[in-house]
C-alpha cells in the first residue's frame, strides 16, 4: 500500500484508542504524540504536524460528540478529518476530450506518466493521442512511442524538428479532432527561463484545458517548492505525484504540494501502466487509516473485461453455489484488478491484516498454481468439483505440471471459500457495515 509505514503507525493510534478503557487526558496525550511521530517519520513538515495535532487535541477537549456517538468514535472522526485537511481539496475532473500539457523537471517520470494517463482515459472509453514534444531527449520519443503501442493509442512525433511548438501545431492539424491529446514536453535539471519560455510557447499553440506537473514523490517537502514555482510561471491546473509506492518521503510530498495551491490530481502507485490513480483525499485517508476504499474497488471491478462473469461468480459465492468455474473467473478478475497486496488495502479492516513479504509472495505463487490447475480441469469438473477424485486428480496434476497435493489443496480451498463466503452473507452485522460503506457512511472505529 502507498505510504504503508505511515498507515501502519496511524492504524496503531486508532487501535490504541479502541483499547483504552477511557478517553482521558493521558490517552489523548499519547495519541497526539504518536500522530506527531508518524507524520514526522513520513517527512510531513514539522510546523504542519504540530498544528494538526494541536487541532486534534483542542477539538477532542472542546467539542462534544454528536448525539449517539461515543467519545472514541468522535476522536477517530476528528483524527480522520484533520489528516484529510493537510492533503488539499479535491478538484473535479471530467473525462470529455481535452488537451493536456505535461510539464516537469528531468527524471521525474513525465514520459511514463504520459503513457499511464493515456491508459487511464482509454479505460474510460475516451480516444487518446500522445504527442512527443521533448525535442532535447531523443530517447523520450522512442519511449513514448513504445508506450503508445502498449496502450493502443494514437502517437505523433516529428523527429529532427527542434521547435516543440511546431510539433504541437502539426499534431493538432493531423490528429483526430474529438480525442484527448496529451503532450509530453522536455524537462530540465532545474526551473530556468529557457524551460519556462518553451512551455509558454507550447501552451500558446496547444491552449490546453489541463496543465499537469509531474513530480517524483521522493523529493519530499521540496516538491512543494517546485509545484509553487511552476504554478506561478505557467499556471498549473494539477499535479501528478509519481513513485509514491516506494517513497518514505511521500507524506512530505503530498502535504507540501497541497500547501502550494496546486491540486494533486493523480498519484502513481507502481511501475505498470495501470498503476495511476485519481487522487481523492477523502478516500486516500480512509485507506491510510485501514477503513478501506470500496469506491476504488468498485471502479476496478467496472474495468474488468468480463464483469458479467465476475458478478455471477460473486453471486454464486454468496449463495453457497460456488463452483470451480466461478473460482476460475474470480482468479482471472483478481489478476486484472492489480497486485494482491494493493487490493487488500481497499477492503475495510483488511489493510490492518498485514502480511509480510514472504507470506505475500507465497500467496501470489499459490494463486498462480491454482490458475494453472484450473486450466487443466474439464468443463464437467468445473461445474461439479465433487467429480474430481482418484485418477482425475492425477490427470489434472499431470496436465498442469503440479503435484497432486496442490490439486487437493485447491479443492479444499474452494470448499472453504464457499463455506466462508456463505457465512459472511449470513452475518447481518457485517452486511450493515458494508451497506453503510457503500452508502458513504461516516468512518468509525468499528470498521
Image (cartoon, rainbow, N blue to C red):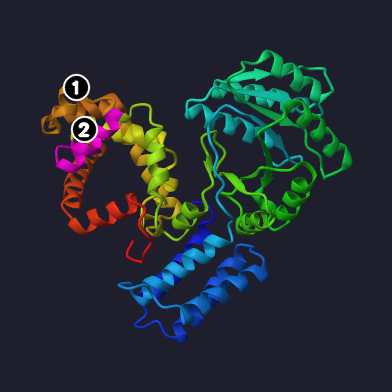
User: Which residue is label 1 attached to?
Assistant: 379
Farthest residue toward the bottom?
25
Q: List x then y, in percent, for residue 379.
A: 19, 22
> Viewed as shown, does residue 248 lie left or right of 122?
right
Q: Nearer the viewer, residue 86 or 30?
A: 86
At a point 76% along the width and 20% down the height, the residue shown is 169
Q: Quadrant of residue 24?
A: bottom left
**Residue 318 at x, y percent in the picture:** 19, 43
Label 1 sits on a secondary structure element that is helix
Q: Which residue is mark 2?
A: 324
- Which residue of the protein is positioned furthest toward the right in this rendering? 193
User: Is 337 in front, or is 210?
Assistant: 210
**Mark 1: few/some/many CA within 10 Å (<14, 14-19, 20+):** few
Q: Image point 18% across, 55% down: which residue?
A: 427
* Residue at x 38% of width, y 31% of height: 304
Q: Main secondary structure of the magenta part?
A: helix
**Region of the chain picked out in magenta, as a range:** 308-322
Amino acid at each position: 500500500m502507498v505510504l504503508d509505514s505511515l498507515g501502519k503507525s496511524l492504524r496503531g493510534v486508532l487501535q490504541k484508542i479502541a483499547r483504552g478503557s477511557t478517553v482521558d487526558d493521558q490517552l489523548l496525550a499519547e495519541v497526539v504524540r504518536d500522530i506527531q511521530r508518524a507524520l514526522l517519520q513520513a517527512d510531513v513538515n514539522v510546523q504542519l504536524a504540530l498544528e494538526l495535532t494541536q487541532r486534534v487535541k483542542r477539538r477532542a477537549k472542546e467539542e462534544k460528540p454528536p448525539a449517539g456517538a461515543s467519545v472514541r468514535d468522535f476522536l477517530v472522526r476528528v483524527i480522520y478529518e484533520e489528516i484529510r485537511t493537510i492533503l488539499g481539496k479535491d478538484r473535479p475532473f471530467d473525462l470529455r476530450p481535452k488537451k493536456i500539457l505535461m510539464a516537469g523537471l528531468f527524471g521525474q517520470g513525465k514520459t511514463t506518466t504520459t503513457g499511464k494517463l493515456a491508459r487511464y482515459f482509454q479505460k474510460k472509453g475516451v480516444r487518446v493521442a500522445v504527442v512527443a514534444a521533448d525535442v532535447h531527449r531523443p530517447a523520450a520519443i522512442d519511449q513514448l512511442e513504445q508506450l503508445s503501442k502498449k496502450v493502443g493509442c494514437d502517437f505523433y512525433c516529428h523527429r529532427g524538428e527542434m521547435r516543440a511548438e511546431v510539433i504541437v501545431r502539426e499534431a493538432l492539424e493531423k490528429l483526430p479532432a474529438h480525442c484527448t491529446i496529451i503532450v509530453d514536453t522536455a524537462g530540465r535539471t532545474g526551473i530556468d527561463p529557457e524551460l519556462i519560455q518553451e512551455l509558454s510557447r507550447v501552451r500558446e499553440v496547444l491552449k490546453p484545458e489541463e496543465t499537469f506537473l509531474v513530480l517524483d514523490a521522493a523529493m519530499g517537502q521540496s516538491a512543494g517548492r517546485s509545484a509553487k514555482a511552476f504554478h506561478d510561471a505557467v499556471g498549473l491546473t494539477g499535479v501528478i505525484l509519481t513513485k509514491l509506492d516506494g517513497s518514505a518521503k511521500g507524506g512530505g510530498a503530498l502535504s507540501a504540494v497541497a500547501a502550494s495551491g496546486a491540486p494533486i490530481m493523480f498519484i502513481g502507485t507502481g511501475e505498470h501502466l495501470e498503476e495511476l490513480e485519481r487522487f481523492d483525499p477523502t478516500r486516500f485517508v480512509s485507506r491510510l487509516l485501514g477503513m478501506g476504499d470500496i469506491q476504488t474497488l468498485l471502479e476496478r471491478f467496472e474495468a474488468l473485461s468480463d464483469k458479467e462473469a465476475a458478478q455471477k461468480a460473486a453471486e454464486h459465492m454468496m449463495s453457497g453455489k460456488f463452483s470451480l468455474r466461478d473460482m476460475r473467473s474470480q482468479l482471472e478478475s483478481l489478476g486484472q484488478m492489480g497486485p494482491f497486496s494493493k487490493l487488500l488495502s481497499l477492503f475495510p479492516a483488511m489493510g490492518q491484516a498485514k502480511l509480510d513479504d514472504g507470506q505475500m509472495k507465497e500467496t501470489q505463487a499459490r494463486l498462480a498454481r491454482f490458475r494453472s490447475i484450473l486450466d487443466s480441469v474439464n468443463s464437467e469438473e468445473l461445474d461439479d468439483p465433487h467429480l474430481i477424485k482418484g485418477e482425475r486428480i492425477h490427470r489434472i496434476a499431470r496436465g498442469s505440471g503440479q503435484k497432486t497435493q496442490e490439486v487437493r489443496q485447491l479443492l479444499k480451498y474452494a470448499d472453504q471459500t464457499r463455506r466462508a463466503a456463505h457465512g459472511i452473507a449470513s452475518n447481518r452485522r457485517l452486511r450493515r457495515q458494508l451497506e453503510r460503506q457503500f452508502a458513504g457512511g461516516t468512518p468509525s472505529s468499528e470498521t
